[in-house]
Amino acid sequence: MNVPKAIECKGSCIPQTEDLADKVAEHPCYSKDAHFKFGRIHVPVAPRCNIQCNYCTRKFACPNENRPGVTTKVISPDEAVVTIRQAIEKEPRLKILGVAGPGDALENPATLETFEKAGKAFPFLTRCLSTNGLLLPDMIDDIDRVGITTLTITINAVDPDVGEQIYSHVRYKGKTYRGREAFQVLNRNQLEGLRQAAMRGMVIKVNSVLIPGVNDRHLVEVARVVKGLGAFILNVIPMIPLAKFAHIIPPSDEEVNRVRDECAAVIQQFRHCMRCRADAIGIPGEEGCGTADESTTVHAEKVCSPRFLQEKPILRVESPMETA
């Protein structure tokens, strides 16, 4: 794929002023070592989403389900600050504050409000945001202003022939796009947003959902494009068969590791992803969902249950999840 000229980098998209590895040394979603030593807290303040992925459903809020897009309760920015304070008191190894849904972080004004309030209350926490990237170019100044230093963008394709199979619709600036046009709007913004974020010094992880028969042979090209625009690391995530893709058999461990190995020739791989919930709290490597070495086994068989929350859970309160 030829990257549109409007988003080509002049020189390098990757900031040269700091060592990116040093910036994520305590981030358990970017570093293998940190995965077993440090914690993150995701505060579920962002229920609304602006795209529909064919592998995603957010209709259920089961507390025993471990996957993105799931939370037992959507909370306000003020509730998030209280929750963060309680969590830090119980687990001082928490280093990362993230917003990862249950919808898209940038579609919800509560996300920036949460980062503003939490940044003042807990300036020692690294602020991390996860997004589908649709609004990233429009809001890059805002996320820079609230102190986002690590950014995750979900990019599942860079070729319209592949991408149009993955998304049902995209809502952007008051208009709903479908089919090929929906993907083209989304992907152009994803790539331009990635480039702009990298030029501002943010450390970028790209998540790519591996969908057998759809993008399994395409992710190496995704790796090449995002690396060229400044991505630091790629996280290949096996698809969970849900929604319109419920009929697709999920990739085996061997398939996932084959794709990761192929992409590793292009960009560093993160091989320890737990497919965290939007309300995840704790040290990922201690949560019992997965194995000690995710480089060989990629499917988690147990539900994440943070050890320090087992007796007095903070966010595990049953409540219908707000959706839009």
Image: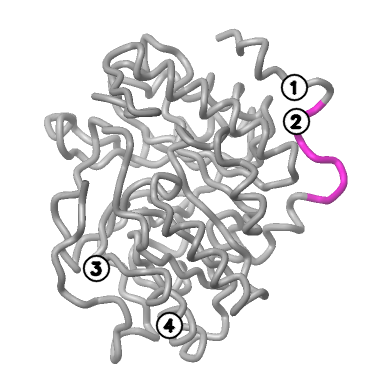
Quote the CA–CA distance across marks 4 and 1: 41 Å
- Point out which mark residue 73 bears: 3
- The answer to which of 298 and 108 lies nearer the viewer is 108
Instruction: Kindly indicate whether the residue at mark 2 contacts the one at mark 3 (C-beta within 8 angstroms).
Output: no
Label 2 environment density (alpha carbons within 10 Å; few <14, some 14–19, many ≥20) = many
What residue is disc 4 on?
82
Quote the CA–CA distance across marks 3 and 2: 38 Å
Q: Which residues are magenta?
A: 12-19
Label 4 environment density (alpha carbons within 10 Å; few <14, some 14–19, many ≥20) = few
Quote the CA–CA distance across marks 3 and 4: 14 Å
What residue is disc 1 on?
9
In x, y percent, where is residue 281? Answer: 41, 72
**Colour mode?**
one colour
Instruction: Kindly indicate whether the residue at mark 2 contacts the one at mark 1 (C-beta within 8 angstroms).
Output: yes
- Left or right: where 38 falls relative to 180: right
Is 228 contained in the magenta span? no
Tell me which residue sits at (60%, 50%) in the image: 143
Query: Toward which corner of the image does residue 175 lie, by quadrant?
Result: top left
Tell me the amino acid under the disc marked 4: Val
Label 1 environment density (alpha carbons within 10 Å; few <14, some 14–19, many ≥20) = some
- Point out which mark residue 13 bears: 2
Numbered disc 2: secondary structure = loop
N-terminal label among 3 and 4: 3
N-terminal label among 3 and 2: 2
- Left or right: where 4 falls relative to 80: right
* Tally of marks: 4
Tell me the amino acid under the disc marked 3: Lys
Tell me the amino acid under the disc marked 1: Cys
Tell me the amino acid under the disc marked 2: Cys
